[in-house]
Amino acid sequence: MSAARDRWLNEGLKVLAEEGAAGIRIDRIAARLNLSKGSFHHHFDGAEGYKKALLAHFEKLSIETFENAISEAGESAGARVILAQLTKLVRPGGTGIYRPELDIALRAWATWDADVRAVQTRLDEARLSALQRVWRSAVASDEEARTAALLPYLLAVGATVVFPPVDADQLRDLYEILLRLVPDSSCQTQDGTTSPR
C-alpha cells in the first residue's frame, strides 16, 4: 500500500470519527490532506471503491490490534493475564483498542448500509471469537467461554453507545473490576475447575 493511499484511508477514518458517514466526501478529505482529486482517482475506483477500501482498512486495523494484543500477552498466559493486557490498551485519544467515536459512527452507518453492516458483523464476530479463545482457559466449556466473552465486549459496546460515551479511563476502571472476577488459571485443575489456593 502506498503512503498516499494510506493517508487517504487514515484521514477517512478521522473524518468518520468526527463527522460520521455523511462527512466522507472526497472533496473535503482532499482539502484536509491538501491533495488533488487526481490523487484520489489514482488510488481508488470512485466513491464506492473508497468506501470499500476504507471499511477493509478499518476492519484490518481493528482485528490486527486486538489479535496483536492477545499475541503479545501469549495465549497460554491465561485469561486474567491476557484480559489485563487488553485493559491496558484502553487508552484515551483513540490510540488503543477503545475508539468510541469510530465505533459509534460505524454502528450508525451500519443501520442503513448493507456493506457496512457486513463489516460490523465480521468485526463483532472476530472480536468475540478472540475473547472466547481468551476465556476458554478459565471456564469449563466453549459455551461458557462465549458467554464470558460477551461480558467485556458488551461492556465496551455499551460504553460506546451511551451519551456521552464512557471515557477510556472509566472503561479501564470497569475492566479492572471485571478482572477481579476472572479465575486465576494457575489455580485450575486438569478438568478445568478452579481449585482453592
Image (cartoon, helix red, strand yellow):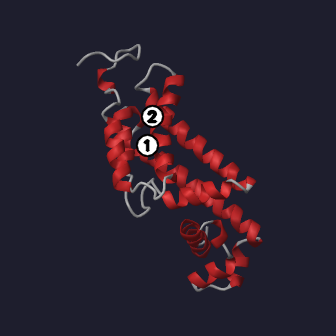
Residue 122 sits in quarter: top right
Q: Residue at x 54, y 38 (%)?
A: 128
Question: In the structure shown, which secondary structural element does the residue marked by tag 2 occupy?
Answer: helix
Q: Is residue 178 left or right of residue 118?
A: left
78 up-or-down from 196: above or below: below
**Residue 134 image label:** 2
Q: Position of residue 172 (x, y in %)?
A: 35, 49
Marks 2 and 1 close (CB-CB < 8 Å)? yes
Q: Nearer the viewer, residue 191 or 115?
A: 115
Q: Nearer the viewer, residue 87 or 174?
A: 174
Q: Position of residue 123 (x, y in %)?
A: 60, 47
1 up-or-down from 162: above or below: below
Q: Residue at x 73, y 77 (%)?
A: 41
Q: Is residue 195 left or right of residue 79?
A: left
Q: Residue at x 59, y 58 (%)?
A: 58
From the image, tell me which residue sits under label 1: 70
Q: Residue at x 58, y 44 (%)?
A: 124
Location of the N terminus (image quadrant): bottom right
- The amino acid type of the residue labelled 2 equals Val
Q: Position of residue 129 (x, y in %)?
A: 55, 36
